Amino acid sequence: MASAYDFNGPADRRFVKAAMKTPMLEPDREFDLARRWREDKDESALHELTTAYMRLVVAMAARFRHYGLPMSDLISEGCVGLMQAAGRFEPAREVRFSTYASWWIRAAIQDYVLRNWSIVRTGTTAAQKSLFFNLRRLRAQIDDTGDGVMTRDNKAWIADHLGVPLRDVENMASRLSAADRSLNAPLSVDGDGEWQDLIVDTSAIPEDQVMARRDDTRRKQWIADALKALNERETHIIRQRRLCEETVTLERLGDELGISKERVRQIEHQALGKLRRALEQIVGDPAASGLIPNA
């Protein structure tokens, strides 16, 4: 049994051997133990209940051993799922604990695999998780288990089978076929360059950054000068509706100013017209300068 699960340490082998020898529980005994733990917090009942189904943890962990993670870690995570199942199990629902616990054990192990299989986060959505854990199996079904690139027809079949976009299949197939590589790894044996040297810098060059800051400063000054053409109420509405990070609603401004939201909308429209005319006198067409939208 130890060799079947790729264990090396004697403690691990003893654990697996003991787990597989522990007899399964009869339904009545299982119900009694679950009830005693849920209602009376009887720890001896919890111990007997979880020990009887430790074989489920071992069997489930073995299904995920091909992801290259230590079998002992997979079992440890499965034990966490087993304890979560015991804590949430409701005997009154007349469902076997083994059936209920299997879901929690599998979920705990899958979460561990996703977190530790790669330093790059993999499978953030339910569809991507399903793709991560089913891609190899589905490729085997269509006899596409070689090391070569998957054909587009095979990718399309898997995407349709799992209900995920074709692009997700392509990305996941690429991720599963390549190991993580450090950006500091050398480009060649004799070269001094690193892989990170090939990453494109998409940020603006210093000259463009300086120009952008100067343009922002000029636009702010133009708007400040144009706002002087508005009265106090118009200025307040424009600031709340157009110049704040969180736009204030017409209804809220109406309640604040003691007028209807329709009247606020009218004042806002009139104020934008005044702003446009003021800005045209300062810089020309304000829409072309990106200062205010078309009113």
Image (tube, helix red, strand yellow):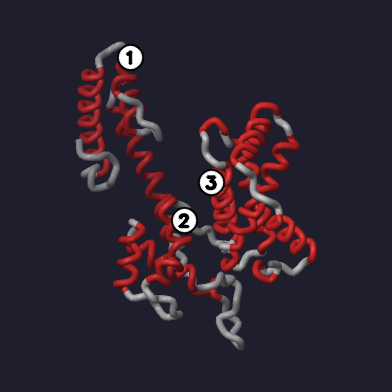
Q: Give residue 227's position: percent from left, percent from top.
A: 32, 30
Q: What's the distance in space between the residues labelled 2 and 1, CA to CA? A: 49 Å
Pointer 1: residues within 10 angstroms few (<14), some, or many (20+)?
Answer: few
As rendered, which of 151 and 39 lies closer to the eye?
39
Q: Residue at x 56, y 33 (%)?
A: 90
Element at label 3 = helix
Q: Quadrant of the N terminus?
A: bottom right
Q: Which quadrant would residue 2 be assigned to in this image?
A: bottom right
Q: Earlier in the sequence, mark 1 or mark 3?
A: 3
Q: Which residue is mark 2?
A: 129
Label 3 close to label 2 by CB (< 8 Å): no
- Proximity of marks 1 and 3: CB atoms separated by less than 8 Å: no
Q: CA distance from mark 3 to mark 2?
A: 22 Å
Q: Which quadrant holds residue 72?
A: bottom right
Q: Position of residue 97 (x, y in %)?
A: 58, 42
Asked whether 20 or 192 is in front, the reply is 20
Q: Is residue 237 above or below residue 242?
A: above
Q: Residue at point 39% right, 70% down? A: 141
Q: Is residue 286 above or below residue 254?
A: below
Q: Quadrant of the C terminus?
A: top left
Amino acid type, mark 3: Thr
Q: Nearer the viewer, mark 1 or mark 3?
A: 3
Q: Which residue is mark 3?
A: 99
Residue indicated by mark 1: 255
> Which of the 4 quarters of the picture holds residue 228?
top left
Residue 153 is left or right of residue 41, and the answer is left
Instruction: Choose the circle earlier in sequence order: 2 or 1.
Output: 2
Q: Amino acid at mark 1?
A: Asp
